[in-house]
Amino acid sequence: MSFSYYIPRVLVSSHKGGAGKTLFTLGLVSAFKNKGFKVSVFKKGPDYIDAGWLSKISGTPCRNLDLFLFDTKTNLYSFYLGSKDSDLAILEGNRGLFDGLDLEGSCSTSKLAKILKTPIILVLDCTKVTRSLAALVKGFISFEEGVEIRGVVLNQIARVRHENIVRSAIEYYTDVKVLGVLPKLRKVPLERHLGLITSLEYDESLFLEELREAILNNVDLDRIFKIARDVSPIFIDNLEERNNRKFSGVKIGVFKDEAFQFYYPENLDSLISLGAEIKYINACQDKGLPSDISGLYLGGGFPEVKAESLSENITLLKEVRKAILEGMPVYAECGGLMYLGEKIIWKNKSYPMVGVLPFSFKVEKKPQGHGYVVAKVKKENPYFEVGSLIKGHEFHYSKPVNVKENKDIKFIFEIERGYGFDGRFDGVFYKNLLASYTHIHIFSVKCWVEKFLERAKLFKI
């Protein structure tokens, strides 16, 4: 059964990645919050870092919307769940507006905007260009039917004369209005190998007030809100399932700190909705596991950046190893996988880790796996049915090295798209541990949480 749903909404996109849309979106969220709005935030595509920043600045969980990982109805319903208690929904696209998986732009930001009937604001990188931007905007307007570009914001403007030429050209040759300028800021979060420094590692007070004031003083927020209000209702299929508390009393340890922070909020919410209690663990500081947990969830992140602190926390390393050897259900993704190996090798230094998996991980200068993953489950395991397809994503600079044969360890995923461990396999299974480079979302792999909790409940008994 579907129902009509209306909320003011706007989507921030660009002509390319790296044009400044994340910084502008953060400033926009902060500026509207400053005006008293309750703002919900969304990130298109598989992304943890931008989503983490959006969550921190908005004060609400950022949901990822993704047309590859889950279907149209689920994306619409997730949007409804994330925005139903807010005054305004702000979405951030990824890469360029029309960039997708193929010639048709499948799963692009533009496709998502059409499904959500959401108007678009383009952030334009104006470095070393003036009148040509009018041609770019004109092409964007006509490139794909049904895409509603309602305004542009100019980034990387050199001086007033530069702004005047760009603004005049765009508004003369197109019907699109320039909504403002994003001035150069003194302090912004720095980038490293996976993108921006994460929100847990950088103090937003160093730049947020300056960014918010820049938006308030240089961007037409009233016009943006008018654009956001001028939208049609969308129709939502009610996909809600009743909360089943059958795993009440089961406690799951979740690593959450500067080293491990990449979690979809829906994955954690699904644990709670089934009755489980989450106990957060700081892998750098906590001197051991909680005594009453019966499962572990290790998300992705930057264990290499905190490798020295992780390796010095010997008590926790030993307790994690002991728990796995005793059969505790453990699910680990990417950074969590690296933590469970023998060593992390980064910048020509080696740092001992848990050592339950017979290989080490070396962090390279270039990505070793980046993009969507499709994997087929090939071997028996407690979490996924043999023959089923797993859709997820990967983004890692590390690769396994010094791989040793071990008859007790098997790879349960056969890669059909993506790279995983070696272009062929992913999903290391040992006892009740499943560790993988592939990140999964509960909306895509709906069986995972319940099967994980079933195993944890048995271990508890």
Image (cartoon, rainbow, N blue to C red):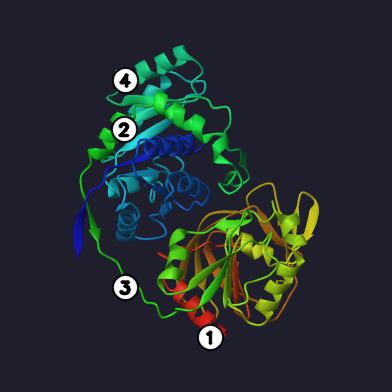
Residue lying at the far right of the rendered structure: 349
Q: Disc 4 vs disc 3: which is toward the camera?
A: 3
What's the CA distance linking mark 2 and mark 4? 17 Å
Contact (Cβ within 8 Å) of mark 2 with mark 3: no
Q: Where in the figure is residue 89, as x and y percent of width and height? A: 33, 45
Residue placed most toward the observer, 160 or 457: 457
State the separation of the CA atoms marked 1 and 3: 23 Å
First reached walking from the N terminus: tag 4 or tag 3: 4
Residue named by callout 2: 224
In front: mark 4 or mark 1?
A: 1
- Disc 3 designates what residue? 242
**Does any portion of residue 385 appear in the rendered image?**
no
Q: Disc 2 to disc 1, how far (Cα)?
A: 53 Å
Residue type (three-letter) at the residue carrying disc 1: Leu
Viewer-side label of 2, 4? 2
Given the current orientation, which residue lies at the most extreme bottom position?
Answer: 461
Labels 2 and 3: the sequence-earlier one: 2
Inter-mark Cα distance, 4 to 1 = 65 Å
Tell me: residue 112, above or below residue 168.
below
Relative depth, front residue between 334 and 284: 284
Residue 256, which numbered label?
none
Amino acid type, residue under disc 3 in the picture: Arg
- Badge 1 is on which residue? 458
Q: Which residue is mark 4?
A: 171
